[in-house]
Amino acid sequence: MELVLVCLIGILYASGMYMILRRSMVKLLLGILLLGNATNILIFLLGNLTAGKPPVIPPDLKVFNDIYADPIPQALILTAIVISFGLTAFAIVLLKRVYVLVDSDDLDDLNTPEEEDI
Amino acid sequence: MRSTILQTASQYLLPILLLFSFFLLIRGHYSPGGGFVGGLVASIAFVLHSFANGVESTMRIIRYKPMSLIPIGLGLSTASMLLPLFFGKPVMTSLWVPEQLPVFGSVGTTLFFDVGVYLLVVGVVLTILFTISLFSE
Amino acid sequence: MLALVPGVLFSYFVQKIPEIGSGRVLFESTPWVPALGVSLGFRLDGLSLLFALLITGIGVLIFVYASSYLKGDRYLDRFFGFLLLFMSAMLGLVLSNNVILLFIFWELTSISSYFLIGFHNRDEESRRSALTALSITGLGGLLLLAGLIWAGNLAGSYSIGDMLNHAEVIRQSAYYPVILILFLAGAFTKSAQFPFHFWLPGAMKAPTPVSAYLHSATMVKAGIFILARFTPVLGGTALWQWALMGVGGFTMLYASVLSLAKRDLKGVLAYSTISALGVLTFLLGLGTDYAVVAACVFLLAHALYKAPLFLVTGIIDHETGTRDLTRLSGLGKALWPAALAGGLAALSAAGMPLTFGFIGKDLIYEATLHYESGWAWYLTALAIVTNVGLVAAGFLAGFKPFTGKVQEEFRHLHLPPALLWVPALVLALLGVVFGLFPGWAGAWLTEPAVKSIFQQYVPVQLKIWHGFNTVLILSLATLTAGIIIYLINTPRFRKSEFITVLERIRPGVVFGWLFIRTKQFAAAYTNFFHDGYLRSYIIKIILFAEALLIYELYRGGPFSVDFSKLSPVRFYDVGIVFILVGALYKTLKTSSRLTAVVCMSIIGYAICLLFVTYSAPDLAMTQFTIDTLTVVLFVLVLYRLPPFLKVRNVKIMVRDAAISILFGGLLAVICLRVLLEPTRYNISDFYAKYAYTLGKGRNVVNVILVDFRGFDTMFEIVVLSVAAIGVYSLLKLRLKASEKE
């Protein structure tokens, strides 16, 4: 299964990067989200996959007596997911404002002409 | 977007979802859940209600501006973080009430911290979404 | 009022004279960067004291003068700020006892002088000469730093005191010539020695108080200062002597001749200053007792006559609005105090008996005459020619504008305010006082300075009258020749062939060419890397990262995957991945915004399912809720926007696809690579072990979030609040602003 996930990570990164290189601002944002998802899976994968053993200590025990899924990547990813929501919200509102001001979704329209001879 | 079925359903879903989120919050220490998830579920409950009945009526239910939840949550978390200082312990040491309560289990500063996170998440999500939907109209 | 600052400092240093005069050296040190051997170490010895007195003493007068000269200027406060900064940097420079500290102050003087020279920043010429001065002195400063660090490493310490003790080690090192060249590059650029002299005449664009302060008494003398300071460390070798005498000798001759060809008053003064700096370098190069004494005396004398000449020039410029020597004449009556100051200063510059300049000039001849080799007479001749030029230049600046017939346009001049002419007069009179009582200056100022240059006691006795000897005859001859040259040096004669030839030797041209080329290169470089398109920035960064990654992977060598350790592939996992990839494909292909957003959410839910199957219930719940909210967010904002742009350029798409696939592939390979590393679970085990016993919780993820790593969560919620406030202000505040309109 790890190999499948590794391929998946590769595909997610590749498509995220491809989206970032588009001219549309919305695609840029979607690309960033894809990269974020890819990274989450990457971290998750590095904590070793464990099926059906959540990191919750059984009610009658004080410590685990069985194997358990690694809790640290989970804590990290949880944080990352929530933060990414904040990022998305801010970025999307920014995008909206730009759209209202420039009336375009095209990144190239944001360029101000620069002085040619410095 | 107004549909009678959704409107009626959301009337009942709101309290149920809120109860569920509250449960997620306080049982978070023992089973999956916690402040973040609880807060998110609670905000989804409100968002659902606002979809069915409009943002204004949801705001009327909450009564306060969702933005005011942000300082409250942040303040609660900070307070529970600083509380150990008054007992001569380093910041963020967890303090516990000795007895176990029936539903809550052990009650301590970490629970208050989680409640702060819960309130803040609700505040943040609702502020963002309501501001945007009011702006779009 | 601001003049109080240098005033107080001046009186502090004056009060230290007896103590330093008795041969003591004061130290003050605070560790700063102990790991690098850099300390805030200061030393006050004779040499420092002489410079400190010049800096603060002339500083007082300049502050007074400038407050009147620049009265009403919009940026007067800024000007005084820069001036104070410069003064402090200069003081720090002469007092520092650590070479790194010395370098920092050195650069500070360059930077603050940049602001001062370019003070009239609306004038393009002014900006350019400021930049020239900064780049020349800054470049020299860097070379100096290299030399100083090298010398410091040889001596085993960056403290100047320690370097004095280890002078032999440095001098006998095989790297000594390189160190010396680096060091001299710094000193020569700062002190405007040929071929770096051209920045100084350019710097005359500065307001006159700045010229008077920086280019007569302080900044340009910094080069002389470090030459003197490091004489005990680096000096005394044949290379040192030849370099200093050669460069100094040529500079003093070249500049003194050139100064006579100038029509601009400040130009005359600039070149005669360069010449005087050449004399000082030359004397330090001679390195005999006489020469060093002469250098110290001449340093003081020069500051005392050059500063008033500059100030007088400033008064003339201020009152008449011109500095053109062909137009100025007969101002003596209207501007009598300035004429008096200028006259006295010019006499001192000419070395007229009973002025301090006379004593300086005497000592120069003594030094060259007593140089024990066959060169003595050649050197003396060189000194005489230079001095003749200096005499004529002094008269040109101090007498010419005030004598002769009054021009019609200047007939109605008024006496300038006292604040303008008093400083000039004070300095000029001081030159005469020191000339009448040279014993004072000798015992108090010169002797301790000479002692710190030689690191041993050398008696200095300055006298007005040395008796009727060769030196006196030479002095008088110089004076006569100078006066004759002054008289025949009319504007017509000035344009003679000889001078134009000299004018052609202009290293400034080379520098200007280099300057423009560097700028062109910088512009081309910037335009290549900063074309303003986000995509091309990202492509460059990613390509570079990819190259690095490929190189690293290549170095790591081949690796193989152990399939037995991997977990089995289950059919519903494959199903999830298929859904995910399908949604991904659709996201890339679709031209509808809404479809893209829906597909994104499908990807999110698929990931959520992955979390469910691999024991992460908390993650699954979070991912699910966040995904739902994100869709809501997108739909709220984006459903009114038009569909995606139809920009189809197959070439670009193929290029981007290639870059992206390479990127994804590389990351996948790295990911595999990391998986093969043995994992350590120490931290996870710690959390698992103590989650219940310490954290009283069974859900380890939640315990980590609220207890073990509570600080991280704390900051995370702060970030969230900031995002919410950001969104709110972006929409609400702009709304209100547009409502107002």
Image (cartoon, rainbow, N blue to C red):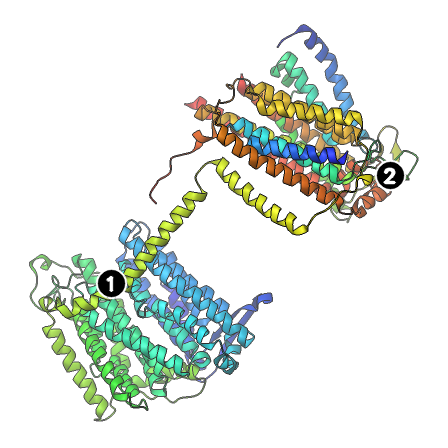
Q: Is residue C529 left or right of residue A68?
A: left
Is residue C94 visible to us here? yes
The residue depicted at 43 percent of the width and 39 percent of the height is C531
Q: Chain of mark 2?
A: A
**Which picture quadrant has residue C57?**
bottom left
**Which picture quadrant has residue C39?**
bottom right
Q: Residue furthest top?
A: B4
Q: Are marks 1 and 2 in contact (CB under 8 Å)?
A: no
Task: From the viewer's side, name the closer residue of C612 and B76.
Answer: C612
| Disc 2: which residue | A67
Residue type highlighted by circle 2: Ile
Instruction: State the image coordinates of residue C174 (x, y, percent, origin top left).
Output: 49, 78
SS of the residue under disc 2: loop
Label 1 or label 2, whichever lies nearer to me, is 2
Q: Check residue C420 in the rendering and tell me which mark sits there, or answer none.
A: 1
Q: Is residue C560 left or right of residue C496?
A: right
Task: From the viewer's side, name the closer residue of C453 and A41.
Answer: A41
Q: Is residue B41 above or below residue C83?
A: above
Residue type highlighted by circle 1: Leu
CA distance separating discs 1 and 2? 89 Å
The residue depicted at 64 percent of the width and 32 percent of the height is A12
